[in-house]
Image (cartoon, helix red, strand yellow):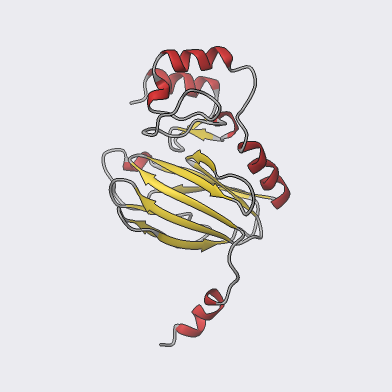
């Protein structure tokens, strides 16, 4: 039992102020932030973390076995249907890190990734507060097309009639660095091409 002294600091650690629930789905990541105050915030395919603060990740799968992994921040954790696992991580420096699914999960497994964005704690809290309210702005015509063509039957967008639960939550999609489970940059051209040909 030589390993036990090495585990003692983790067993005595105080609870993390922030809990992030990550659900693996073929072939994307659902991310729900549970801050100490305020409502939960849902996003997809991007995980933001405050630098220097311990975060508890709750990981699970909605369909098949996936494996959550952010190589620079910690070991991988299997995500097994019907089971919830916990992982505690802390980013020690700001940066953007790629997180792949580390368990073969089907035909698009190689494309299933997310961005982990470690940022200054104040910037993180501002970002999280902004995510908690519906987005406003110049997307009215796109929003109308989105609803008219049935996209809201699969995708959820906070503050709209789009209430789908099959595809990724697209609330605040403009604030994400990537789309399509981390495989495309979030640019107008890439999003347009992906909508026209998601295969």
Give the residue at x 63% y 43%. Answer: 128
* Residue 2 at x, y percent in the picture: 44, 87
Residue 123 to residue 154: above or below: below
* Residue 14 at x, y percent in the picture: 60, 70
Residue 134 to residue 140: above or below: below
* Residue 50 at x, y percent in the picture: 64, 53
Q: Quadrant of the N terminus?
A: bottom left
* Residue 72 at x, y percent in the picture: 52, 57
Tell me which corner region of the image, top left, top right, bottom left or bottom right, holds residue 25: top left
Give the residue at x 40% y 14%. Answer: 149
Left or right? Give the position of 146 relative to 33.
left
Left or right? Give the position of 198 relative to 7.
left
Tally of numbered tags: 0
Front residue of 84 and 106: 84
Give the residue at x 70% y 50%. Answer: 120
Tell me which corner region of the image, top left, top right, bottom left or bottom right, holds residue 136: top right
């Amino acid at each position: 039992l030589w390993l036990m002294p090495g585990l003692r600091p983790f067993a005595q650690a105080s609870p993390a102020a922030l809990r992030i629930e990550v659900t693996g789905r073929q072939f994307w990541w659902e991310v729900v932030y549970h801050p100490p105050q305020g409502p939960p915030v849902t996003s997809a395919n991007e995980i933001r973390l405050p630098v220097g603060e311990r975060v508890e990740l709750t990981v699970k799968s909605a369909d098949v076995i996936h494996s959550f992994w952010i190589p620079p921040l910690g070991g991988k954790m299997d995500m097994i249907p019907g089971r919830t696992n916990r992982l505690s991580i802390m980013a020690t420096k700001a940066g953007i890190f790629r997180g792949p699914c580390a368990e073969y999960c089907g035909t698009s497994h190689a494309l299933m990734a997310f961005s982990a964005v470690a940022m200054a704690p104040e910037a993180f809290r501002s970002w999280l507060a902004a995510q908690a309210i519906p987005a406003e702005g110049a997307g009215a015509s796109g929003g109308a097309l989105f609803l008219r063509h049935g996209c809201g039957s699969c995708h959820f967008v906070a503050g709209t009639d789009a209430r789908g639960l099959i595809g990724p939550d697209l609330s605040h999609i403009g604030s994400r660095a990537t789309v399509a489970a981390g495989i495309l940059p979030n640019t107008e051209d890439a999003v347009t091409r992906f909508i026209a040909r998601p295969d």
